[in-house]
Amino acid sequence: MGHRCKLSMKARMTLLSSARPLNAIYDAALVDLDGVVYIGSQAVPAAPEAVEKARAAGMRVVFVTNNAARTPAAVAEQLTALDVAADAQSVVTSADAAARMVAERFPAGSPVLVVGDTGLRHAVWRRGLRPVSVSADRPVAVIQGYSPRMDYDLITEGGLAVSQGALFVVSNNDSTTPMDRGILPANGSFSRVIANATGQEPVVAGKPMRPLHEEGVLRTGARAPLVVGDRLDTDIEGATSNEAASMLVLSGVTKPADLITAPTRHQPDYLAWDLGGMNLPHPETQAAAGEAHCGGWTAAVREGHLRLTGEGDRLDGLRALCGAAWSAPQEAGSDLDSRDALAQLGW
Ligand SMILES: [Mg+2]
């Protein structure tokens, strides 16, 4: 089963397989950053070599982020410091996607009120639009993105402009972001101020909505992109809504138990420990009616429990569990008990 089966796989039953490394069948990788390339200030150990190897195999690798605060050049600089080769051209941000959405609707030179940081102002300017900061400039659109310096005046001007008819666009709609200190409010929470005050719901550029992904495809000229990420509800759902192939890496936030009980739109095509999975073949996971085989493992759904027998590679065991759960006659949901099976694999 190859990647071209994807469109007929709407009701997914199992993971896809590939006898060749993924870098040989997908021409571009749209790679998420946090949890995939780095975690906090540290590179994910496998990331630098994985990116280099994929590029050497002819795959175009770009980095795709919902963060609209920093410029692509600043992100590229950070990646380079982590030994991941990157230039501004290889970084695609939700600010770029938001600016393109506005540039496609309004003529060059149109004023756009930027409720955000440097990265967003630059993106607007690069698209030939004119960043402004007061509603008196009659902006055609308001774009809001995260800024650590978000201030009252700017939000007020943004609210005024939206109430006067400006198009309301947000770079991304994540309500929170996990940081060292805990869960912090993110752009999706800040943008509620203007949305509540005006009654206007924003148009969203970032994951899981289509524009950011489309920006990555435009940037790479990809015909067969592979989306790589660590989050089911942004990276994988984004790939699903764009009908692109996806690979989930376990180096970030997603836990095996969440993957097993994921709804169809959150189920990835491929599963890997880390970014190195781009450069590997992926084994077949046969699955039907709640029973699945991968490597030396057999998994089955029995009375609300996942059972696992066999031996072999841990990731193959997880693949078998996914196949069994995803192909079960009724969507497993969070009721499916995978604890014993995962404990057998050391989770
Ligand atoms: Mg991530």
Image (cartoon, rainbow, N blue to C red):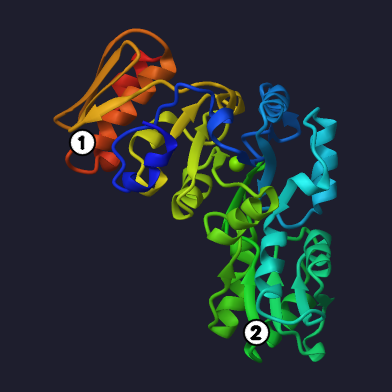
305 over 91 or under it: above or below: above
Characterize the local packing of mark 1: few (<14), some (14-19) or many (20 or more) Cα atoms within 10 angstroms. many
Please provide percent x and percent y for residue 40. 71, 35
- Give SS at disc 1: loop
Quarter of the image where the N terminus is located: top left
Give the mark nearest the N terminus, 1 or 2. Answer: 2
- Name the residue: 50% across, 35% down: 247
* Residue that mark 1 sits on: 328
- Name the residue: 79% across, 63% down: 123
Q: Is residue 199 left or right of residue 60?
A: left
Q: Is residue 93 left or right of residue 279?
A: right
* Residue that mark 2 sits on: 162
Disc ID at residue 85:
none
Type of the residue with mark 1: Ala
118 over 78 or under it: above or below: below
- Name the residue: 68% across, 38% down: 61
In the foreground, 244 or 72:
244
100 over 112 or under it: above or below: above
Characterize the local packing of mark 2: few (<14), some (14-19) or many (20 or more) Cα atoms within 10 angstroms. many
- Residue 347 appears in the figure: no
In the foreground, 30 or 39:
30
